[in-house]
Amino acid sequence: MRRLRTVVCSALLGTALAVAFATVFASPASAATNLYWKNGTNVSKSTVWSGANASNIQCYAPSGYYATMCIRFDRRTIYVRSDKANGYFKLGRWTGGGNAYVCQNNHKNSSGDNTWVGCHWTWPKKGCYTMRTGYGQSDWYVTSGPSGVKCY
């Protein structure tokens, strides 16, 4: 009887630890996020910066990802610049409120250097978010680490 109780207690403890481990150490990628993805439309640099001030634009350009992304809060628009023509599309990703919005710049070759594209969205007017940039091809892509959490 004592041995049976030990086996049952061990099994229950093992199950509880497995569930706790899976819950605590689950990958953020497995978190419920709605993904919205658009190919951007060409815009000029002056379009991105026209009327910009410290309260209505935020940019992010981590090294090694060959892309700059800017968010215009007053326009609910993500802008993505290709910083290097290396054969890969560039992207900007805004994540907040359980949603991820990706804008893709498809200018991959030498004519794509420093080109801007924009993607308009209807995300919430207030909230907290992180930004990422990245690059890729049709069957894969990589993204940078997130910016710090920002709230607007």
Image: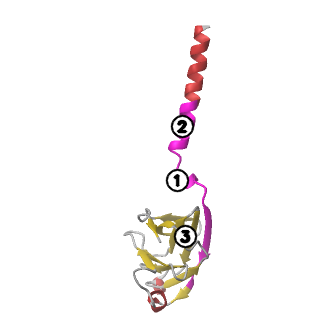
Range of magenta residues: 16-41
Residue at image point 57% right, 70% down: 101
Disc nearest the viewer among 3 and 1: 1
Which quadrant, please, contains the N terminus? top right
Identify residue for label 1. 28
Q: Kindly give the residue lying farthest to the top in the view shown.
A: 1
Label for residue 137? Answer: 3
Residue 126 vertical position relative to residue 75 in the rendered view, above or below:
above
Q: x, y (%) of residue 83?
A: 42, 79
Q: Are marks 3 and 1 in contact (CB under 8 Å)?
A: no
Q: x, y (%) of residue 106?
A: 55, 79
Residue 82 vertical position relative to residue 144 in the rendered view, above or below:
below
Alpha-carbon span between mark 2 and mark 1 = 16 Å
- In the picture, residue 113 is in which quadrant? bottom left
Density class for disc 2 (Cα within 10 Å; few <14, some 14-19, many ≥20) is few
If you read the primary sequence from the N terminus, does the residue marked by circle 3 or circle 1 appear first?
1
Q: Are marks 2 and 1 in contact (CB under 8 Å)?
A: no
